[in-house]
Amino acid sequence: MRYSDEFRDREATLAIARRIASLATGPATIMEVCGTHTMSAARFGLRALMPEGVRLVSGPGCPVCVTAQPDIDSFLSIGDEPDTVLVSFGDMLRVPGSSDSLEGKRAGGAQVRVVYSPLDAVEIAQQTPEKRVVFFAVGFETTIPATAMAVLSAKRSGARNFSVFCAHKTMPRALRALLESGEVRVSGLLCPGHVSTIIGSAAYEFIPDEFGVPCAVAGFEPVDMMAGVESILRQLREGAARVDNAYSRAVPREPNARAMEIIYQVFSPCDAVWRGLGVIPKSGLSLRETYADFDAAILFAQAIARVPEARPSACRCGDVLRGVLAPEECALFGRTCAPENPVGPCMVSSEGACAAAYRYGGA
Amino acid sequence: MCLAIPMRIVEIDGPNALVEVGGVSRKARIDLLPEVSVGDYVLVHVGMAIARVDADEAERTLSLLREGPYEV
Amino acid sequence: MTETAVIERVTLSHGAGGPAMTELVRQVFLSAYGDCGETGDDSAILDVDSGRIAFTTDSFIVDPLFFPGGDIGRLSVAGTVNDLLTAAARPVAVAASFIIEEGFQIEPVKTIASSMHETAREAGVRIMTGDTKVVPAGAADKVFITTTGVGVVLRDGVSGSNVSPGDRVIVTGSVGDHGAAVLLARENLLDAPQARSDVAPLTEIVLSLIESDCEIHAMRDPTRGGLAAALNEIARQSGVAIEIDETSVPVTPEVRAVCEALGLDVLQVANEGKMLVFVAHRHWEQALSVVRASRYGTNAQVIGEATSGPAGRVTLRTVIGTSRLLRPPVGELLPRIC
């Protein structure tokens, strides 16, 4: 597969690993802020290539993991309403809310469909006009344009039975909140490669400028992630802090104008609750008033209002997401919390830090 | 998040493209990338092309990384 | 005398045990299965040499019923035959029970029965008995099939608990074909015309191995859960560790592309025409050449070995040379976007 295989080359990966080994000057904690980075690092066993003292830590970049429990509960409650079809990405199917999951709801008789694209959800709505088809919109800037297109497409084609439950979140403000909290000492940040195709690498410049933390925008193949780590260690060696674009074949410096236009035509920024991080101002998106007819939060407001408050659980996803607790350090890990019986989303999501640690191990 | 794989544009019809890789194809929207042409490789995520893969830049990156040290 | 009409759709009376059912069985099943020694009795009688009998059953609920490379009928016979083969048994006979949803068209049922007959012939078994029930519309999803198989054990000691450190692991061909094809046939995700189910009975491969003097310790067909599930089962049963080399696992380019695009781990995707063979170290080359000489084994590869590491642990040497755990999948196969 072109542009994938070359970046999985063993020789190139090991060449970078050797350079990293001579670059590392001491302990360093590199946070990779992207569930897909977590997954990739685990799948390719990249931790084994890190020199002594260089730790790769997962951050809050797993949209499944950071979706707040009340949001999941609210979306599930819509499934109890008559003639509804809940549509979601496969990633969300097993994520537990307070008492149930989409999979559980389906077993209980609710109509649940898995799609690959939000546009497929609009097609489902068009094919079943007698049903109210509600799409669970999770994901960061990489995914948001697709949801925006789906809303525009539904409006254009008159699919009045389609709506979106918007739990989308944006990256930069979450990174700011994380760094401002000072909770985890991060030596460097591996920035999410595909979010960056939409927002541009310049979006992270506030990080070295205001916090002095080196950044590298990295892709997802082993060579890409290793290149990102190398850049950060090189910056640390130089005593410098900047945003390196190690994914220059796909990521521009400036944002994608078309994408920004379509996102902000349909959505406006709002405060959002992130699991583990709490409320981060203006880090979420909600549908603009023009599209109120497609806003599930409005259409199903009564059902949502009846959802009982989420009970706190022993799950420590929040701590894991902020990088202050390694999955293996959680008392529940591998005991009461495992993929077959997950307590929280970090274990359910295939790219959650806990699931990755459990499945791929520290072999 | 962000599973996206490089796929080659085989056909373009307005905002719709047919993309393929390894004998597998699907339709993708190219609204976000007005400048792409048939033959280009694009990253496809949830049915949308989100970026064009620059062949020259890919080559350059690979040689730099193979030889090192990697300078931006 | 009333003329018996050609049946078009299955109705509840076809499952009620009376003349309508007899007619259905005649028009659909007996005409498809050919000579199966049908006596009209409730039990089939088999003549077997004395020895040990292998005995297995499985139910088939695949959706869609027809997919590139096969259908539920072929699957129901191949699946049960392959299970018998893993016990180093020569499959002899199969029983097939159908549960059909009221209102379902007869033509597809005939096609399914015919497919079962062809697969049975290929596998060297006879479909000797069966049952048909019809349930009200909505009580079943079109057609469910349960097959039960019997076979004669040819060689003792072939079991998932008999793998020893040093044994080599052979996979008889490319992985992930069936699961990828069925997923795409069910969900409109991608177009992959070359992605076809590998569903096939592996009688030739296994009987050839048994006839050779290769010391085979275990065989397992990696169905649901793919290689990952099967390897973990064996590692646990035998109390060994297993190491697999990712680069040596055969995967077709199409299946690879499907898995990359949908975020699936090809090692967790189902196979229905493949066998994992655990062979004593000294016989691996011979075993490999026996398998490769068979119709469904031409792409066989040695993919790893059992070791004396921690019991039950399966690890994968990745394409970049690092090592990571290979755990069985949890739950159904779902496409990811993250």
Image (spheres, coloured by chain):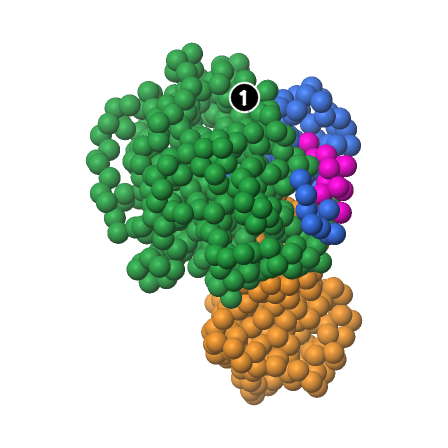
Q: Is residue B68 above or below residue A141?
A: below
The location of residue A10, given as percent across then percent down, is 69, 58
Q: Secondary structure at mark 1?
A: helix
The residue at 69%/85% (across/down) is C282
Q: Identity of the amino acid at label 1? A: Met
The location of residue A318, given as percent across then percent down, is 33, 45
The residue at 49%/32% (across/down) is A209
Question: Can residue C264 be seen at all in this image of the molecule?
Answer: no
Q: Residues within 10 Å of mark 1 (few under 14, many from 20)?
A: some
From the viewer's perspective, tell me whether residue A297 is left or right of residue C59: left
Q: Residue furthest front?
A: A239
Please identify the quadrant where the C terminus of chain B is shown: top right
The residue at 63%/71% (across/down) is C304
From the viewer's perspective, tell me whether residue B72 is left or right of residue A173: right
The secondary structure that most of the magenta stretch takes on is helix
Q: Which chain is blue?
A: B
Nearest the eye: A298 or A227: A227
Is residue A256 within the magenta segment? Answer: no
Nearest the eye: A279 or C268: A279
- Label 1: which residue? A260
What segment is highlighted magenta in the picture? B52-63
Q: Which chain is green?
A: A
Question: Can residue A201 be seen at all in this image of the molecule?
Answer: yes
**Could you tell me which chain the residue with mark 1 belongs to?**
A
Is residue B55 within the magenta segment? Answer: yes
Q: Residue furthest top?
A: A290
The location of residue A300, given as percent across then percent down, is 31, 24
Nearest the eye: A187 or C147: A187
From the viewer's perspective, tell me whether residue A349 is left or right of residue A22: left
Write down the colour of chain C.
orange
Image mark count? 1
